[in-house]
Image (spheres, rainbow, N blue to C red):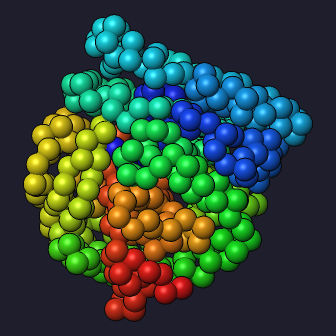
Amino acid sequence: MKTRCGFLFVIFLFGFLGALCGQSAKDKNPVYDYEGLAQKIVNQCAAVRENDIVMITGGVKNMELLEDIAVNVSKKGGYPLITVWSDRATSRYLSEVPAKYDARNPKLGLNLYGFVDVVINVSYSESNDLYADVPPERIAAMNNANKPVSDLYVKRNIRGVNLGNGLYPTTAQAKEFNISIEQLSEIFWNGVNVDYTKLESTGKAVSKLFAAGKEVQITNPNGTEIKVGIENRKVLVSDGITSPEDLTAGSATLQIYLPAGEVYMSVVPGTAEGKVVVDHYFFEGKDIPGLTLVFKAGKLVSMTSKSGLEPLKAYYDASAEGKEDFSSVDIGINPNVKMIPGSNFVSWVISGMVTITHGNNEWAGGENNCPFGNSYFLPGSTLKIDGKVLIEDGVSKF
């Protein structure tokens, strides 16, 4: 499942995001540097300040990195709080804890987010199918119950860093991408070690093109053909840096995704018209080939596939209102992350990648705050802004 709305309360939903642990990047890649990464996260990404209360979340196998982050928080005069979880704990929760507790008041989350200033989330799950056998009603109940937590997160402008962004090397993720763990490790570290000054410059240039536009059109040889309005919508750039301007611009600008390298925006509600075809969409570790979504007047009106649609459709049907809204457009600008021919490799940050979402778009500066949000990668697409080509056949023109 590719989603972003879960980031706001990920520690209470036990790992909807990508993975960080698994096979050790330390053993697989010579540019491994946890301490350097911790310094970058604390000083550049989260912009931790004296007296900040910083919650650091991750897995039990990530303790070295979590400790490095905590020490660097303390060096800035902040107060670190480490919380840990694991796939084993998630599995036991889902199989042993009565479902009646899924919908209870999120007392812990509301209390924590009532005083925390920064959340640094190190994605920890080593499995892509932890929720495969969980009734969709349970997942929807947990999402709905924790919505007040995400609302509080946004209201208090808590700064957030998500390390992983679907790319940190694990055996399960490499298998889904149909590449080796060594390849995925190299991709992750190259993406993290991008030239942030150049990334920031590219982001600003591309964001100006979107900001001046009225309509985006996306096409793909696989049958995708959709257009959507973007006039007067706020454009956001994921460049890995929390600037002084970001600190006063609202919650969406305060969320950092690493590896960085995206330009994204919410769209004009009710304007999406057309069809989106996803050649391979993985849901709970299983491929849904030829997933086809049809949008009319901004709403998802049809969802079909060649096979394997039932689990995704059941999860969608059980989710809250707002799930049907075409909600954002995202393009990748990280020059260090590229497509791999013959693989299933996809990512938000691949230079020239086009990604669309429906459902929640608060993370993209929008108004849709429903607990559901799904994202779909469209490699090899052509994207035009008011007829001007910005990406052609998956290759950026900026």
- Vertical placement of residue 39 versus 139, above or below: below
Q: Residue at x 34, y 92 (%)?
A: 387
Res. 27 in view: yes
Q: Residue at x 10, y 54 (%)?
A: 306
Q: Nearer the viewer, residue 294 or 129?
A: 129
Residue 151 position, x and y percent, is 47, 39
- Asked whether, in this view, residue 226 is left or right of residue 258, the answer is left
Q: Nearer the viewer, residue 153 or 128?
A: 128
Residue 109 position, x and y percent, is 53, 24
Residue extending farthest to the bottom is 388
Q: Quadrant of residue 245?
A: bottom right
Q: Nearer the viewer, residue 181 or 97?
A: 181
Residue 74 position, x and y percent, is 85, 32
- Asked whether, in this view, residue 234 is left or right of residue 50, the answer is left
Residue 371 position, x and y percent, is 35, 40
Quick one: quadrant of the N terminus? top left
Q: Nearer the viewer, residue 392 or 99?
A: 392
- Asked whether, in this view, residue 302 is left or right of residue 128, the answer is left
- Asked whether, in this view, residue 353 is left or right of residue 100, the answer is right
